[in-house]
Image (cartoon, grey):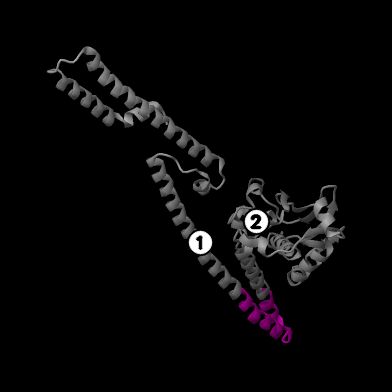
Amino acid sequence: MNFKDFIKDKIISISLIIFGILTIEIFLIPYKFGNFIKLYIPITILSLYFIALIIEYFTKKNFYKRLSKTINELDEKYLVTEILKMPNFIEGKILKDSLEQTNKSMIENVNKYKYNQEEYKEYIELWIHEIKIPIAASKMIIENNKNTATKSIEEELDKIENYIEQALFYARSNTVEKDYYIRKNNLKDIVNECIKKNKNILIQEKISLKLHDLDITVNTDSKWIIFILNQIIQNSVKYRKKENNLEIEIYSKKGRENVVLYIKDNGIGIKKGDITRVFEKGFTGENGRLSNKKSTGIGLYLCKKLCNKLGIAIEVNSIENKSTEIRLVFPISSFIEKNFN
């Protein structure tokens, strides 16, 4: 807010004041007043008016400057009305009241949206738990009626289970902090549980596994890490080379500040230009477009999102047509270690 713009905004009132002074001077002409009186009246009126204008200008300037500074410093801009003091001029009061009403309306709409989202999330979770019952029953029937056809059906049921699990974790991904339990977990147990979940496809596709140096303890939630590992292994199987047997190597290394879990494969790799985007939502890259396997671009996006929530770094390194390496970096915190011991 500059003084020039302020004066332009007051041009009508200034014109009226000047017109009023000229009118008074015209009416004083017939009367025998001295020049002092004729000068004193307009000068006094103009001086007082411009003093009032200057006071008003600095009052408003300071308020809007403070408002702009507060907004720029806030991460949540909508909280400005909670911090801003009530101004002592009418336009400022009207502005603050209007902002408060707008903010109140916005919060009501957000709460309504959150309620609808939570209701939908609860429905999805309930549906997922319900759909697991007929899948489990189908697997029991298959177990008692082993043949080539039922084996193929079981493979498809495993895929359905994987997609269902992905949908469940996606629904919960925005509220991970309400659903995880951080405690000491052995990486060997976590990896073995993940391998167990994928045993059918690993056996069917004759995947070669190399597990070593996994007897290391980390502080994390095993359920979420198993899901993340499952997505990584599923990707390795999906993007394997048809002409070669897939080899997956999983091992860990402990440093001074972190524990790194490595998942390496000799699959088709990732194009150099795609590596920086593999964690983007919906990004399938060249491999996803060219592969006969339909890709959603959700798996690695979810892995990245969940890792961020859990305070774990996820990194990827790949050589096209040769290998892919994904690293999960678990921080070692002396504070956490003391509280767990």
**For this rendering, which residue is in front, 168 or 10?**
10
Quadrant of the rendering where the C terminus is positioned:
bottom right
Q: Circle 2 — which element?
A: helix
The question of residue 82 being in magenta is answered with: no
Q: Position of residue 52 (x, y in %)?
A: 36, 29
Residue sticking out furthest to the left: 30
Residue 259 visible in this rendered orientation of the protein: no
**Prevalent SS, magenta region:** helix
Tell whether 83 sits left or right of 32: right
Which comes before the other along the chain, label 1 or label 2? Answer: 1
**For this rendering, which residue is in front, 178 or 92?**
92
**Image height check: is 177 above or below 131?**
above
Residue tagged by mark 1?
A: 111
State if disc 2 and disc 1 touch (CB < 8 Å).
no
**Image height check: is 30 above or below 332?**
above
| Extent of the magenta region | 128-155
Residue type at numbered disc 1: Asn
Residue tagged by mark 2?
A: 305
